[in-house]
Image (cartoon, rainbow, N blue to C red):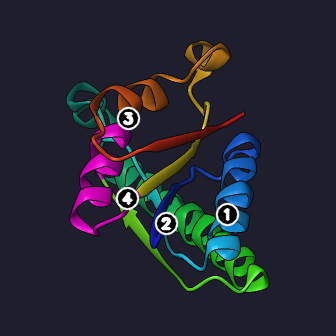
Amino acid sequence: MYKHILIATDGSEMATHGLNHGLKLAASVGAQVTIVSVTDIWASGALAEAGASTIASYEEAMHQSIKDILSEAAGRAEVEGVQHETVHIPNRYAADAIVETAQKMGADLIVMASHGRRGLRKMLLGSQTNEVLTTSTIPVLVVR
């Protein structure tokens, strides 16, 4: 049924539920998986006020965090016996990057959690999840 599943994760507990569900689905149907993590664009005002050393510190911490998130996700895929690759997409809005990457890679399903790390907006359906649902032409499986 599915041959290529894109799974989005931000490393949060809820996103890990989505990752695990997507990997189990991929294992059951023999699909390959692309695991994607997206880091947001810094606001231009924040960049102007932060200064070069703060930006460098932030970028280094973000790089290490994404490396850890994708390494853990790859380990989970290996345990499930799923053929996979990991992709980090920096400096993009998550929903746009997820949909574009799924299209570019020929994914036939997007799996993501109902919400991730987004403050008060995450209480119902996360804003990024909602945007993926409304803009994707590829089926989306939302895991709660």
The residue labelled by disc 4 is: 56
Report the side of 137 relative to 141 (left or right): left
Query: For the residue carrying disc 2, how many other residues have a C-alpha within 10 Å: few (<14), some (14-19), or many (20+)?
Result: some
State the image coordinates of residue 68 (x, y, percent, origin top left).
Answer: 64, 70
Task: From the viewer's side, name the closer residue of 102 and 43.
Answer: 102
Nearest to viewer (mark 4 / mark 3): 3
Q: What segment carries the magenta color? A: 91-108
Disc 2 from disc 3: Cα separation: 19 Å
Exactly how many numbered labels are in the figure?
A: 4
**CB atoms of marks 4 and 3 within 8 Å:** no
**Pointer 2 or 3: first along the chain:** 2
**CB atoms of marks 1 and 4 within 8 Å:** no
**CB atoms of marks 2 and 1 within 8 Å:** yes
The residue labelled by disc 2 is: 2
Tell me what residue is drawn at x 54 percent, y 76 percent: 31
Amino acid type, callout 1: Leu
**Pointer 4 or 2: first along the chain:** 2
State the image coordinates of residue 4 (x, y, percent, origin top left).
Answer: 44, 70
Report the side of 128 relative to 55 (left or right): right
In the displayed structure, 6 sits above or below 30; it is above
Disc 3 from disc 1: Cα separation: 20 Å
**Pointer 2 or 1: first along the chain:** 2
Nearest to viewer (mark 1 / mark 4): 1
SS at mark 1 in the image: helix
